[in-house]
Amino acid sequence: MICDDKRINIKQGSIYKLPYRDNYFDFVICSEILEHLSDDKKALLEVERVLKPSGFLIITVPNYNFPFLWDPLNWILMRFFNTHINKDLWWLAGIWADHERLYTTDEIINVVKKHFKILEMRQFISWCWPFSHFLLYGIGKNLVENLGFSQFSRFNFKKKSSSSLLAKLIALPTDFLDKKLQNINSTNIAIVAKKIQ
Protein backbone atom coordinates (compact mmCIF):
# COMPACT_ATOMS: atom_id res chain seq x y z
CA MET A 1 0.00 0.00 0.00
CA ILE A 2 1.52 3.30 -1.10
CA CYS A 3 0.41 6.78 -0.13
CA ASP A 4 2.10 9.92 -1.49
CA ASP A 5 0.79 12.12 1.33
CA LYS A 6 3.78 12.64 3.66
CA ARG A 7 1.47 13.41 6.60
CA ILE A 8 0.33 9.78 6.59
CA ASN A 9 2.53 7.08 8.08
CA ILE A 10 1.22 3.61 7.21
CA LYS A 11 2.44 0.71 9.34
CA GLN A 12 1.53 -2.92 9.03
CA GLY A 13 1.27 -5.16 12.08
CA SER A 14 -0.86 -7.65 13.96
CA ILE A 15 -3.88 -6.32 15.78
CA TYR A 16 -2.99 -8.76 18.56
CA LYS A 17 0.40 -7.01 19.03
CA LEU A 18 0.23 -3.44 17.73
CA PRO A 19 3.62 -1.75 17.15
CA TYR A 20 2.85 1.12 19.55
CA ARG A 21 3.47 1.78 23.25
CA ASP A 22 0.73 1.85 25.89
CA ASN A 23 -1.58 4.89 25.93
CA TYR A 24 -0.29 6.12 22.55
CA PHE A 25 -3.45 7.18 20.67
CA ASP A 26 -6.23 9.64 21.46
CA PHE A 27 -8.47 8.03 18.85
CA VAL A 28 -8.63 4.62 17.12
CA ILE A 29 -10.83 3.53 14.21
CA CYS A 30 -11.46 -0.21 14.01
CA SER A 31 -13.61 -0.42 10.89
CA GLU A 32 -14.61 -3.76 9.38
CA ILE A 33 -11.90 -5.68 11.26
CA LEU A 34 -13.38 -7.58 14.21
CA GLU A 35 -15.51 -9.87 12.05
CA HIS A 36 -12.37 -11.23 10.34
CA LEU A 37 -10.55 -12.19 13.54
CA SER A 38 -10.47 -15.51 15.35
CA ASP A 39 -10.36 -13.63 18.69
CA ASP A 40 -12.18 -10.29 18.59
CA LYS A 41 -11.98 -9.88 22.38
CA LYS A 42 -8.18 -10.21 22.39
CA ALA A 43 -7.96 -7.62 19.60
CA LEU A 44 -10.04 -5.14 21.60
CA LEU A 45 -7.76 -5.64 24.60
CA GLU A 46 -4.83 -4.59 22.42
CA VAL A 47 -6.74 -1.57 21.11
CA GLU A 48 -7.53 -0.66 24.71
CA ARG A 49 -3.82 -0.91 25.56
CA VAL A 50 -2.75 1.60 22.90
CA LEU A 51 -5.56 4.08 23.64
CA LYS A 52 -4.90 6.89 26.11
CA PRO A 53 -7.14 7.13 29.18
CA SER A 54 -10.48 8.53 27.99
CA GLY A 55 -9.39 7.86 24.38
CA PHE A 56 -12.10 7.32 21.79
CA LEU A 57 -12.79 4.24 19.67
CA ILE A 58 -15.00 3.89 16.61
CA ILE A 59 -15.96 0.38 15.53
CA THR A 60 -17.94 -0.78 12.51
CA VAL A 61 -18.96 -4.39 11.94
CA PRO A 62 -21.36 -6.22 9.60
CA ASN A 63 -24.86 -6.69 10.95
CA TYR A 64 -26.26 -10.20 11.33
CA ASN A 65 -29.65 -8.65 10.56
CA PHE A 66 -28.65 -7.32 7.16
CA PRO A 67 -31.29 -6.37 4.55
CA PHE A 68 -32.59 -9.09 2.25
CA LEU A 69 -31.41 -7.30 -0.91
CA TRP A 70 -27.80 -6.98 0.31
CA ASP A 71 -27.27 -10.75 0.08
CA PRO A 72 -30.53 -12.62 -0.73
CA LEU A 73 -28.89 -16.05 -0.89
CA ASN A 74 -27.35 -15.95 2.59
CA TRP A 75 -30.41 -14.19 4.01
CA ILE A 76 -32.57 -17.16 2.95
CA LEU A 77 -30.01 -19.76 4.06
CA MET A 78 -29.58 -18.15 7.49
CA ARG A 79 -33.25 -17.62 8.26
CA PHE A 80 -34.70 -20.84 6.91
CA PHE A 81 -31.84 -23.36 7.07
CA ASN A 82 -29.61 -22.00 9.87
CA THR A 83 -26.53 -22.02 7.63
CA HIS A 84 -24.66 -19.76 5.20
CA ILE A 85 -22.16 -20.02 2.34
CA ASN A 86 -18.67 -20.84 3.56
CA LYS A 87 -16.46 -17.77 4.13
CA ASP A 88 -13.65 -19.28 2.04
CA LEU A 89 -15.77 -19.21 -1.12
CA TRP A 90 -15.18 -15.44 -1.16
CA TRP A 91 -16.46 -14.99 -4.74
CA LEU A 92 -19.86 -16.48 -3.74
CA ALA A 93 -19.95 -16.09 0.05
CA GLY A 94 -21.59 -12.67 -0.07
CA ILE A 95 -21.65 -11.00 3.34
CA TRP A 96 -19.83 -14.01 4.83
CA ALA A 97 -16.75 -13.60 2.58
CA ASP A 98 -13.67 -13.97 4.80
CA HIS A 99 -15.83 -13.35 7.92
CA GLU A 100 -15.64 -15.41 11.09
CA ARG A 101 -18.85 -13.90 12.36
CA LEU A 102 -21.53 -11.25 11.87
CA TYR A 103 -22.82 -9.33 14.90
CA THR A 104 -26.24 -8.57 16.28
CA THR A 105 -26.42 -5.25 18.11
CA ASP A 106 -26.53 -7.08 21.46
CA GLU A 107 -23.46 -9.18 20.59
CA ILE A 108 -21.24 -6.26 19.62
CA ILE A 109 -22.40 -4.22 22.62
CA ASN A 110 -21.49 -7.12 24.96
CA VAL A 111 -18.01 -7.44 23.43
CA VAL A 112 -17.26 -3.72 23.57
CA LYS A 113 -18.78 -2.77 26.94
CA LYS A 114 -16.34 -4.95 28.90
CA HIS A 115 -13.54 -2.44 28.32
CA PHE A 116 -15.18 0.67 26.89
CA LYS A 117 -18.06 2.97 27.71
CA ILE A 118 -20.41 3.02 24.72
CA LEU A 119 -21.41 6.58 23.86
CA GLU A 120 -23.44 5.94 20.72
CA MET A 121 -24.51 3.13 18.44
CA ARG A 122 -26.00 3.41 14.95
CA GLN A 123 -27.00 1.09 12.18
CA PHE A 124 -26.47 2.22 8.60
CA ILE A 125 -27.05 1.21 4.98
CA SER A 126 -30.56 -0.18 5.04
CA TRP A 127 -31.49 0.00 1.37
CA CYS A 128 -29.37 -1.29 -1.49
CA TRP A 129 -29.28 -2.70 -4.98
CA PRO A 130 -29.92 -6.47 -5.08
CA PHE A 131 -26.79 -8.56 -4.41
CA SER A 132 -24.73 -5.45 -3.53
CA HIS A 133 -22.24 -7.39 -1.46
CA PHE A 134 -21.66 -9.86 -4.27
CA LEU A 135 -21.14 -7.00 -6.73
CA LEU A 136 -18.67 -5.23 -4.44
CA TYR A 137 -16.79 -8.21 -3.09
CA GLY A 138 -17.31 -11.16 -5.40
CA ILE A 139 -16.88 -9.26 -8.65
CA GLY A 140 -15.11 -6.09 -7.45
CA LYS A 141 -12.38 -7.87 -5.48
CA ASN A 142 -11.70 -10.18 -8.41
CA LEU A 143 -11.39 -7.22 -10.81
CA VAL A 144 -8.93 -5.42 -8.53
CA GLU A 145 -6.80 -8.33 -7.32
CA ASN A 146 -6.79 -10.72 -10.24
CA LEU A 147 -7.46 -8.65 -13.35
CA GLY A 148 -5.43 -5.53 -12.54
CA PHE A 149 -8.24 -2.98 -12.25
CA SER A 150 -6.27 -1.02 -9.62
CA GLN A 151 -8.26 2.18 -10.24
CA PHE A 152 -11.16 0.48 -8.38
CA SER A 153 -9.06 -0.47 -5.35
CA ARG A 154 -10.18 1.05 -2.04
CA PHE A 155 -6.48 1.58 -1.35
CA ASN A 156 -6.05 3.74 -4.43
CA PHE A 157 -5.28 7.14 -2.89
CA LYS A 158 -5.46 9.11 -6.13
CA LYS A 159 -7.79 12.11 -5.89
CA LYS A 160 -9.97 11.12 -8.85
CA SER A 161 -10.42 7.40 -8.65
CA SER A 162 -13.04 5.25 -10.33
CA SER A 163 -13.78 3.59 -6.99
CA SER A 164 -15.35 6.80 -5.63
CA LEU A 165 -17.78 6.95 -8.57
CA LEU A 166 -18.62 3.27 -8.12
CA ALA A 167 -19.19 3.80 -4.39
CA LYS A 168 -21.57 6.69 -5.15
CA LEU A 169 -23.58 4.51 -7.54
CA ILE A 170 -23.75 1.63 -5.05
CA ALA A 171 -24.83 4.07 -2.29
CA LEU A 172 -27.71 5.63 -4.26
CA PRO A 173 -30.52 3.53 -2.71
CA THR A 174 -29.40 4.11 0.87
CA ASP A 175 -28.73 7.82 0.26
CA PHE A 176 -32.22 8.25 -1.15
CA LEU A 177 -34.33 5.79 0.87
CA ASP A 178 -32.76 5.52 4.35
CA LYS A 179 -34.21 8.89 5.39
CA LYS A 180 -37.61 8.26 3.79
CA LEU A 181 -38.33 4.61 4.58
CA GLN A 182 -37.51 3.17 7.98
CA ASN A 183 -36.02 -0.32 7.96
CA ILE A 184 -35.09 -2.36 11.02
CA ASN A 185 -32.26 -4.08 9.15
CA SER A 186 -28.93 -2.60 8.15
CA THR A 187 -25.72 -3.88 6.65
CA ASN A 188 -23.50 -2.34 9.34
CA ILE A 189 -23.38 -1.38 13.00
CA ALA A 190 -21.24 1.50 14.22
CA ILE A 191 -20.23 2.19 17.81
CA VAL A 192 -18.53 5.20 19.33
CA ALA A 193 -16.93 4.31 22.66
CA LYS A 194 -14.56 5.75 25.24
CA LYS A 195 -11.82 3.91 27.11
CA ILE A 196 -12.74 3.31 30.73
CA GLN A 197 -10.09 4.89 32.95
Image (cartoon, rainbow, N blue to C red):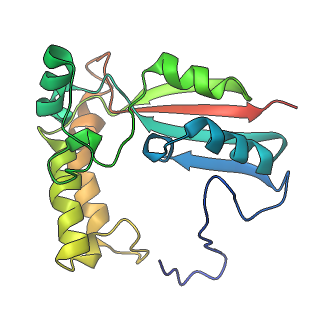
In the shown orientation, is residue 21 left or right of residue 168?
right
Is 72 drawn above or below residue 58 in the view shown? Answer: above
Q: For the point 61% across and 73% down, which residue is it?
A: 10
State whether residue 195 appears in this view. Answer: yes
Q: Nearer the viewer, residue 182 or 97?
A: 97
In the shown orientation, is residue 66 left or right of residue 30?
left
Q: Position of residue 61 (x, y in %)?
A: 45, 37
Q: For the point 11% across and 32% down, which residue is it?
A: 73
Quarter occupied by the C terminus: top right
Q: Nearer the viewer, residue 185 or 95?
A: 95
The quarter holding residue 156 reads bottom left
Q: Position of residue 151 (x, y in %)?
A: 27, 76
Count of numbered labels shown in the rendering: 0
Is 37 drawn above or below residue 164 in the view shown? Answer: above
Q: Position of residue 76 (x, y in %)?
A: 13, 23
The quarter holding residue 85 reads top left
Q: For the point 20% across and 74% down, which residue is it?
A: 146
Q: Nearer the viewer, residue 95 or 176?
A: 95
State whether residue 32 appears in this view. Answer: no
Q: For the point 30% across and 27% down, which residue is it?
A: 178
The quarter holding residue 127 reads top left
